[in-house]
Image (spheres, rainbow, N blue to C red):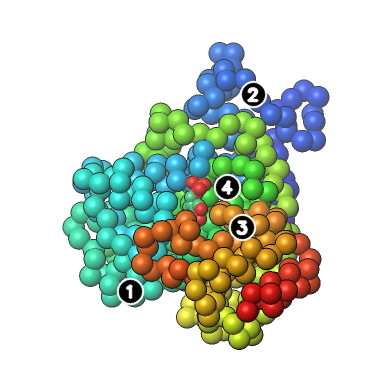
Amino acid sequence: MKIETIAVHGGNVVTDQLKPVIQPITLSTTFKHQEDSMLYTRLENPNRKSLEAVMSTLEGGADAAAFSSGNAAGNAVFQALPAGSHIIAPDDMYHGMKMLLQTVYAGKIEVDFIDLTQSEKVLQAIKPKTKLLWIETPSNPLLKISDIRSLASIGKENNLIIACDSTFATPIFQQALALGADLVMHSSTKYISGHSDILGGILVSKEKNVFWESIKNVQKLAGAVPSPMDCYLLTRSIKTLPYRMRAHSANAKKIAVFLDGKQEVEKVFYPGLPSHKGFETARNQMSDFGAMLSFLIKGNADEADSLIGKLKYFSDATSLGGVESLIERRSKVQANDSSIPDQLIRMSVGIENCDDLIADLDQAFKATF
Ligand SMILES: Cc1ncc(COP(=O)(O)O)c(C=O)c1O
């Protein structure tokens, strides 16, 4: 099956004698005791099973585990590690996940935040108790590209588990398991949902091994699972994921070029621009570049806010991956992070007509500068 066909059919299970074409939502929390059925919805639910099946097939994995948020999915990986483990994570890891490691896991798990684009730094950081190498590519919000293949080979030589947060890429543009990762993680709140109305996370594993069983245990026993309704909606959203991603990415490319040509813009961070440091690596490991970009204006935070305030079609809001375009001055969310300049603007490019988006940006630039 090709990816579009998997997206439409991979999560649809006939669970009903009437044979509805679309799988119903099974809200029941419990199931009558019988062989080969389900027991209790925290452990298993037909809609969650369908979501996990389609995501696992899309990523080319052996199994998947769905969670109630992206952070809950990451948390399940950290919780499944032996106490006292050491993790290597990106220096620009998604800030919410970084905070999770720095606060909830303080004193329980040791973490080094490293620039993963420099492999010698990764090698230097490995210790006898290092268990996990966490990659995030493209990264949030600086769109750094880490070379999954080469990091995975360093990881394998040193017996590490390789996990990759592929939220910005989705399985449509990046197949991290085929590139050597053991686990892929998504905040399904983003492109997988695609409509900014569901919070969710998902892990896909290349193998059903002992570590994966520990993760499934965290899912079932700690119970941060998505509701059947959310699983149903995510499975529905996935049916259009390949087409949405193409539209998102086509718009983002045009907007990146537009911004790159603006004299009021200092720098554009988009891996699809040949001037981007990670362009070649992105081209080698992604089938397209995605729809997240950041840019620095030649101006201060007030001017960045003023530009954002003049836009009609870009909502000034955090998050990403919905069909509607979003924009924000990132340090409003990531305050106290010295790596994020005050005038850095992050954009999640939607699937509106790109001419409208560019005209909107153009008028906002003219009115601001
Ligand atoms: C790259 C990345 N990973 C993980 C997360 C966490 O996902 P969630 O907000 O669904 O918990 C986010 C959220 O913005 C993200 O951007």
- In front: mark 2 or mark 4? 4
Q: Is residue 220 left or right of residue 266?
A: left
Neighbourhood count class around disc 1 (C-alpha, 10 Å): few under 14, some 14–19, many 20 upward: some
Instruction: Write down the residue under mark 2.
Output: 27
Q: Position of residue 275 (x, y in %)?
A: 54, 85
Q: State how far apart marks 2 and 4 are (Cα).
A: 21 Å
User: Earlier along the polypeptide chain: callout 1 or callout 4?
Assistant: 1
Q: Is residue 23 left or right of residue 368?
A: right
Q: In which image quadrant can residue 123 be found?
A: bottom left
Q: Residue at x 56, y 13 (%)?
A: 33
Q: Residue at x 43, y 70 (%)?
A: 341
Q: State how far apart marks 1 and 4 are (Cα).
A: 31 Å
Neighbourhood count class around disc 4 (C-alpha, 10 Å): few under 14, some 14–19, many 20 upward: many
- In front: mark 3 or mark 2? 3
Q: Position of residue 256 (x, y in %)?
A: 63, 76
Label drawn at residue 119: 1
Of residues 8 and 260, the one nearer the viewer is 260
Q: Residue at x 78, y 68 (%)?
A: 356
